[in-house]
Image: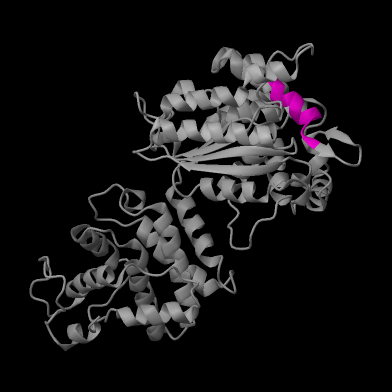
Amino acid sequence: MINLFLSAWWCSCSCFRCASLSRFLEREFYYSNDVEGYVSIFDALEKDENVKVRLMHAGGWVVQGQIRALCLACYLCFGMRIIQRSSFFQALERECGLPVKKFIDQVKSAIVDSLSLPSDVVRTSALEDNLFAGVIAVAARLPLLCLGCDGTSKTLSLTLLLSQMQGKLSGSHLLQGLARVQTFHLQLSERSVAKSVTDLKKTVVQWKGDKMASSIPCIFMEEMSMAEAGPTGPLRALHDLLDAHQDAQQDCKENAGSIGNSGRRVGTGSNTFAFVATSNYKSGSNTLPIGRALGNRFLVLAHEPLLSETLIDLAVRFGLNKLSNSDHPGIKSALNESVSAVCKANGTCWDSLVPDVISIRSLLFYSQFLALQYEAAGLPAQAAQQRGRLSSAQVAAFAAHLQPVKMDLCRSVWKALSSSFRIESDFALPTIKDLVKLNESLEERVDPPPSYQTLFRHRQQLDDDLRPDSGNSDEMNDDDDKSPTNGKAGAAAHPPL
C-alpha cells in the first residue's frame, strides 16, 4: 500500500515515517493501567463509554486487524495533505478493498467524542479534523502543521486540546493515558527574527532535560507562513528547531549499547518534544507557504476553502450557539437571511465581500452579535414591529463587527448591503447609547463595539446615506467631529459624546 504513494507523490522518508507511525498506533499509543503496558489507539478509544455506544450501533470498526493502523497512518502522512481527498480515498480503497474513508470518519468522531468540548464551541468538520490530527501528532510527537483559511478553527482546536492534555489529571479517559503537556507558545509575524526561534529551542530542550518522562514540552507556533528566509529570518532557524526535535546525538548517548537504537525514529513517540503549528494559505494556491523542504518535515493538514453555503451554515450555527434556545426557528430564519445577504452581496467591485473585505472571523462575530440582539428583541413579533427590530439589529451588528476601517470602503460595503437588509428610507439609525444599553442588557455576552469615536463617525456617514432630505448623500463628510445638521432627525440620532 505504501508503494502506491511512493511511486505517485511522496519521497521515501515519508513512507518510513508512515511505517513507524503505523507501528506506534497499533502497539504503543496509550499507556493502560489495566494491562500495565501500552495498547493501540483503538483499544484506548473503546474504553470511553460514548465511543463504545457509537461503535456498538455501527457494528464495530469497519476495518479490522492490523491493517487499520496502516490505513490511519497513510491518511495522516499522505491524505491530509491533499485538499480534495476524494481521489486519495478512491486510490486507497481500490488498492486494499476496504471502506477507508468511512473508517477514518469513525476514528475522527471517536476522538472528538472522547474529549470535553465546551458548550459554546461549535462542532464542525474542520474542528474534528484538527482535534483528530492534533491528538495523534502530539502523542507520536510528530510535527503537525494545520493549514487553512480563517474559520477553520485551527487556533481554537489546538488551544483547546493542549489545555486538556494534563496526563492522569485529564478529564478525558483518552488523554489520561498520554503524557502531560507543557505548552510553549510563539506567534510569528513579519518582524520575527531567527533569534526568537533559537531562544525557544534552547528553552524547550533545557526544560525537557529537567523534567520527568511523564511530561513533554510542546511548541505551539502560530502564523508559520510569516517565517522568512534570509540571514536574520526565522526560516533557517525552523530547520534547526526540527533537527533538535529528532536530537539523534542525544538519543545515541541515552541508548548506548542498545541494538537498533542509533537515533530517534520520527513517529514513535520518542522525540524530544511535540510541535504543532498553524498557517494561512491563499485559496487556489498549490504551494506550501513555508516551502516544500520545510513542509515535508511536517504532517500537514490542509483544509478545504470554505464555500459560500458552508460559510453561511457555519456562521448561523456559531450565532445560534450562545442563545438560550439554539433551535429557535424564527431567529434561525432571520439570521440565515442576514448572513446570506453579507456572503452573497451583489453589485460590488469585489469578487466576494467575505473574505476579500470582511474577514471570516468578523462574519462569525457579526452573526453571534445579531442572534443575541434578535433574542433580546423578542423575535418573532408583529410583522411591522418585526421589520423595525430586524433592521435595527442589522445596523447595530454592522456597526459593531462589519464596518471596515476606511470610511470610503465602509460606505461602499454599506451600500452593497443596505438593499439586502431592507432598510426603509425613513429608518432611524440606533444611537450609540442604544448600543451601550444593549450591551449592558445582554450581561456582556456581546463583544463590545469599536471605540465610540470610530463608531460615531461611521454611523454619522451611514445616517447621511439613509436620510431622504440629504442633498449631498454621495459626497464624503470630512468633518468627523461635527454632528449632521440636515434636520432634527439627524441631530437627535447622534447625541453629544
Q: Nearer the viewer, residue 427 or 333?
A: 427
Q: Report whether 196 appears left or right of 167.
A: left
State yes or no: residue 295 in magenta.
Answer: no
Q: Quadrant of the C terminus?
A: bottom left
Look at the magenta stretch and give its main secondary structure.
Answer: helix
Judge whether 301 appears above or below 375 on screen.
above
| Residue 190 place in picture, x, y as percent | 34, 38
Give residue 442's position: percent from left, percent from top. Answer: 49, 78
Residue 232 % position (x, y): 35, 28
Q: Is residue 11 visible?
A: yes
Can residue 302 be spotted in the picture?
no
Quadrant the N terminus occupies: top right
User: Residue 338 or 373: which is nearer the viewer?
Assistant: 373
Q: How many discs mark residues in the rendered view?
A: 0
Closest to the observer, 151 or 343 = 151
Q: Which residues are magenta?
A: 19-30
